[in-house]
Structure formats: C-alpha cells, structure tokens
C-alpha cells in the first residue's frame, strides 16, 4: 500500500511539472532551447539595444560576464566571451513583419550606427549579428518567377515592388 501511494505521489508530481502553464503564465514556463550569443565585451550593450527594438522584451539578469534577456517573448543569453569567435551569416535571427512599415522600421534601426545591408532581406547589426527582416507574405509574394527575380536583386524587401513583378 505504501508503494502505491508513493507511485501516485510521483505521478502527480511528474504531471504537475510537465503540464502546460496556466493561461497568462507562459513567461514563467522554462524555455527548452535558448539562443546563446557570444560577444567581444558588448553583450549587455547589445542586449539593451535589442530590447529597445521589440515589444514584450526585457533584461532579465545581467553581470559582467553574461546577460539573460527576452526579445518578443523569446529567451536569449549573451556572453562576453572575448574576441575568439565572430558572428557570421550561418546563423541569423528572422523577424516576421506584418507589413512594409514594420520591415522599414526594423531595417532602419538594425542597420543604424554601423549595421550593414546585405541581400534578400538580410542585414548585420552594429554588433555583427545577422538578421532577416522578412514580411509574413514573402512566400506567397515570391511564388511567381518574376517576383523571385525581383527579390533576389533587393537588399531590403519591398512588398509593393514584389506585388508589381
């Protein structure tokens, strides 16, 4: 009988630990996978910059070595790891934009103060991190070959130009 009670107790504890958080409590849920970013001494500066750009964003914890932050509800950790490793285009953050105004806003802010434009909606911010600033409608917009060709010639995505193509 004692073994059965113990098994029931363990099962309840497991269910409680693994069930989805109550509505409105998603921020309290532990994120399974967290993006970890390596900076050369500017982790907190970069995190504060990113947090200033996106709604539902905040600095969670910061010290001289690391900063934990949330961007649009997604958790990140930034490390002041030193000059050994640099960002490259093999990894990027994709921003899903509802319209051209949102594309323009993020593009302008992320390329400011030393950021670099690239091709097809890609850019690097002033810290060297690659971003894709992409309208939600892009897959539908580039379904036509002419629109795909137009997009390949663009830096920042121009929705109206893709619609005309």
Image: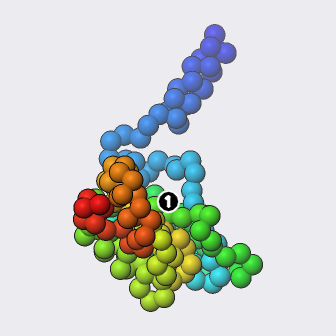
Percent position of residue 4, x then y: 62, 14
Residue most toward the right? 84
Q: Nearer the viewer, residue 76 or 66?
A: 76
Q: Nearer the viewer, residue 159 or 143?
A: 143
Observer able to see residue 86: yes
Q: Nearer the viewer, residue 118 or 26?
A: 118
> Relative to 108, is 121 above or below?
above
Q: Nearer the viewer, residue 35 or 115?
A: 115
Question: Split into 4 quadrants, where in the image is the N terminus?
Answer: top right
> Relative to 112, is 141 above or below?
above
Q: Residue at x 36, y 57 (%)?
A: 146
Q: To which quarter of the image does residue 71 belong?
A: bottom left
Residue located beneath label 1 in the image: 75
- Left-right relation of 35 to 25: right
Secondary element at tag 1: strand
Q: Residue at x 51, y 29 (%)?
A: 15
Percent position of residue 10, x then y: 60, 26
Q: Residue at x 43, y 81 (%)?
A: 111
Neighbourhood count class around disc 1 (C-alpha, 10 Å): few under 14, some 14–19, many 20 upward:
many
Residue most toward the top? 1
- Left-right relation of 26 to 98: right
Percent position of residue 48, x then y: 45, 78
Residue most toward the front? 146
């Amino acid at each position: 009988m004692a073994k059965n009670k113990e098994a029931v107790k363990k099962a309840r504890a497991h269910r409680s630990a693994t069930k989805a958080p109550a509505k409105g409590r998603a921020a309290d849920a532990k994120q399974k996978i967290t993006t970890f970013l390596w900076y050369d001494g500017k982790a907190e500066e970069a995190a504060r910059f990113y947090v200033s750009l996106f709604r539902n964003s905040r600095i969670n914890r910061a010290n001289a070595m690391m900063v934990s932050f949330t961007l649009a509800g997604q958790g990140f950790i930034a490390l002041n790891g030193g000059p050994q490793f640099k960002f490259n285009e093999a990894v990027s953050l994709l921003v899903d934009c509802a319209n051209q105004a949102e594309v323009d806003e993020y593009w302008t802010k992320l390329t400011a103060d030393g950021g670099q434009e690239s091709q097809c909606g890609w850019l690097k911010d002033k810290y060297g991190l690659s971003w894709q600033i992409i309208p939600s409608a892009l897959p539908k917009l580039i379904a036509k070959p002419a629109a795909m060709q137009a997009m390949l010639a663009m830096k920042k995505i121009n929705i109206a130009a893709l619609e005309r193509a």
